[in-house]
Amino acid sequence: MTEPTEREKMLRGELFVSFTPELIAARNRCKYAYTRYNNAGEVPRRRLIELWKEVIEDESPLPPRLEDPIADDELFQNEPWIEPPVKADYGFNVFLGKNVFVNSNCVFIDTMPITVGDRTLFGPNVSLFAGGHPIDPAVRDGMDGPEMGAPITIQEDCWIGGNVTILPGVTIGKGSTVGAGSVVTKDVPPFHVVAGNPARIIRKIETTMKE
């Protein structure tokens, strides 16, 4: 039986070494892709979607181009909107739903999957850290030591305020709001407001939306 690669270990949530040729190349590919996205300038919506799909390694085809530029833009009204600049480690572990808005300076440390549900809104400077390092410095061992990760899941219809940090393994329930500047270290139940460092429940949200 062959030994798993460091990428395979990473995707399984095991300890892995990130400074290997394969993973360095994967991060460089993502960096070049998000740099092209960030520097796109004034381009049609179609081109932005193409560039974003390069970041996340999504090879699904776009709909046929329409001659009317406005009508062509409307083909992508349900695609996520990501304000540049944006950064990610690998890109292929970022999954954004329909009508998701990501404000500027978002950082995705996507060692493990980061999944964002439909109609969720991000303020600026949101950081999602699905990767981390061992606490024991003897194990951590700088760039020679292992890393690990845990998925981040943000369900539908959430609002993540500006300057929020979300740590590995966190799930934020449907319809919840995270106050600006919060550090989310544990799961948030659906339809709640949380805030603070670490984030704590402030109140339940009264809504007609069903869980």
Image: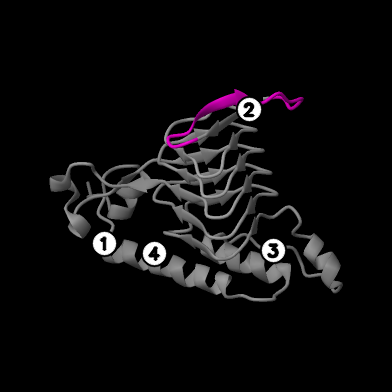
Circle nearer the viewer, 3 or 4: 4
Q: Mark 2 points at which residue?
A: 191
**Residue 100 versus residue 190 in the image, above or below:** below
The residue stretch that appears in magenta: 196-210
Q: Residues at badges 3 and 4 in contact (C-beta under 8 Å)?
A: no
Residue 199: x %, y % from top left? 47, 33
Q: Name the residue under label 3.
A: 62
Q: Earlier in the sequence, mark 3 or mark 2?
A: 3
* Tag 4 secondary structure: helix
- Of the pair 3 and 24, the residue shown nearer to us: 24
- Main structural element of the magenta stretch: helix, strand or loop? loop
* Tag 3 secondary structure: loop
| Residue 11 placement, left or right of 144 | right
For residue 129, the mark is: none
**Residue 94 versus residue 171 in the image, above or below:** below
Q: Give the amino acid type for the residue marked by disc 2 in the picture.
A: Phe
**Figure quadrant of residue 104:** bottom right
Q: Earlier in the sequence, mark 2 or mark 4?
A: 4
For the point 74% across and 27% down, the residue is 209
Q: Give the amino acid type for the residue marked by disc 4 in the picture.
A: Arg
Circle nearer the viewer, 1 or 2: 2
Circle nearer the viewer, 3 or 1: 1
* Tag 1 secondary structure: loop
Cα gap from disc 1 to disc 2, whole angstroms: 40 Å
Q: Which of marks 3 and 4 is nearer the N terminus?
A: 4
Q: Mark 4 points at which residue?
A: 27
For residue 19, the mark is: 1
Cα gap from disc 2 to disc 4, whole angstroms: 35 Å
